Image: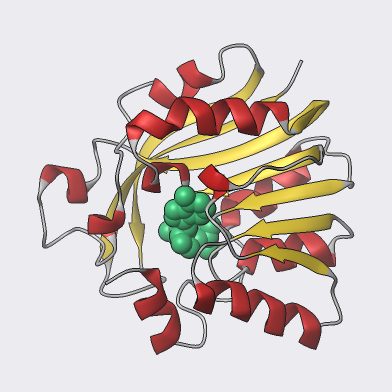
């Protein structure tokens, strides 16, 4: 079972609204409304929001159902999104972006590939550009095997981040915000809890 299973079952598994954190960060931080990359875009809630704000969006999503939904939704809304139905790890991007979002997708990559994924992400960002990254941490019930509190997708996670690990990856960036927290989630499946780390940083 993978995300295709959940994406095919429901119209919008993660809902249509963009993530609260993305909306808040775009209000609080100075972001050039230019080219944006959404890594692990899912069914496109954040890509669509960014495109509606005027960003020129590229969405990378390896599941067929997720990628197709982004195409369908963006066509319906008359938004132009470049959807790449592929794995971020094997895709060579020649473009540079002003904003890169990875909303709980880097944690789906195995640790052995993470250094390359992060290097690639950094290379793809223009100087002055911003990143918004959220990952699952070892405080997540999925890692702690507290299955009554864990998300039904928690077994898709390949790497739960250590304390400060995400921040360390970007120590050469200007870190504007970093937090590790536990948060209830009622957006999909049964009510559950997540342990996450969130990073907002600027390339210098
Ligand atoms: C928890 S979902 C989040 C989806 C979306 N970011 C959101 O917030 O609605 C994680 C997504 O990452 C995608 N993903 C997993 N591994 C990936 C990889 N190697 N490259 C790109 N995307 C990946 C999955 O297919 C899934 O859609």
Task: From this view, report whether residue 62 is shown above or below residue 188.
Answer: above
Residue at 33% x, 57% y: name it: 184
User: Quick check: can you spot residue 104?
Assistant: no
**Residue 80 image point, x, y percent:** 85, 70
Looking at the image, which is closer to me, 123 or 196? 123
Q: Residue at x 73, y 22 (%)?
A: 203
* Residue 47, above or below 72: above
Q: Is residue 95 left or right of residue 144?
A: right
Residue situated in front as seen by the camera: 73 or 164:
73
Does residue 105 appear to the left or right of 186 in the view shown?
A: right
**Quadrant of image for the C terminus:** top right
For the point 81% across and 37% down, which residue is it?
A: 96
- Residue 193: image location, x then y, percent: 27, 55
Q: Percent position (x, y) of residue 81?
A: 79, 67
Q: Quadrant of the N terminus?
A: bottom left
Residue at 20% from the left image edge and 58% from the top image edge: 150
């Amino acid at each position: 079972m993978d995300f295709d299973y959940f994406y095919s079952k429901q119209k919008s598994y993660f809902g249509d609204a963009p993530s609260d954190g993305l909306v808040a960060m775009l209000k609080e931080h100075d972001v050039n409304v230019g080219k944006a990359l959404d890594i692990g875009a899912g069914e496109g809630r954040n890509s669509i929001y960014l495109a509606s704000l005027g960003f020129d969006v590229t969405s990378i999503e390896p599941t067929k159902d997720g990628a197709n939904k982004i195409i369908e939704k963006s066509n319906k809304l008359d938004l132009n999104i470049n959807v790449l139905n592929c794995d971020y790890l094997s895709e060579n991007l020649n473009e540079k972006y002003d904003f890169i979002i990875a909303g709980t997708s880097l944690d789906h990559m195995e640790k052995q590939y993470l250094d390359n994924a992060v290097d690639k992400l950094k290379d793809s960002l223009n100087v002055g550009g911003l990143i918004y990254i959220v990952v699952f941490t070892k405080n997540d019930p999925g890692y702690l095997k507290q299955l009554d509190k864990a998300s039904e997708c928690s077994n898709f996670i390949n790497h739960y981040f250590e304390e400060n690990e995400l921040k360390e990856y970007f120590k050469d960036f200007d870190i504007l915000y970093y937090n590790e927290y536990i948060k209830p989630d009622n957006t999909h499946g049964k009510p559950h809890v997540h342990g996450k780390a969130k990073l907002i940083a600027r390339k210098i």
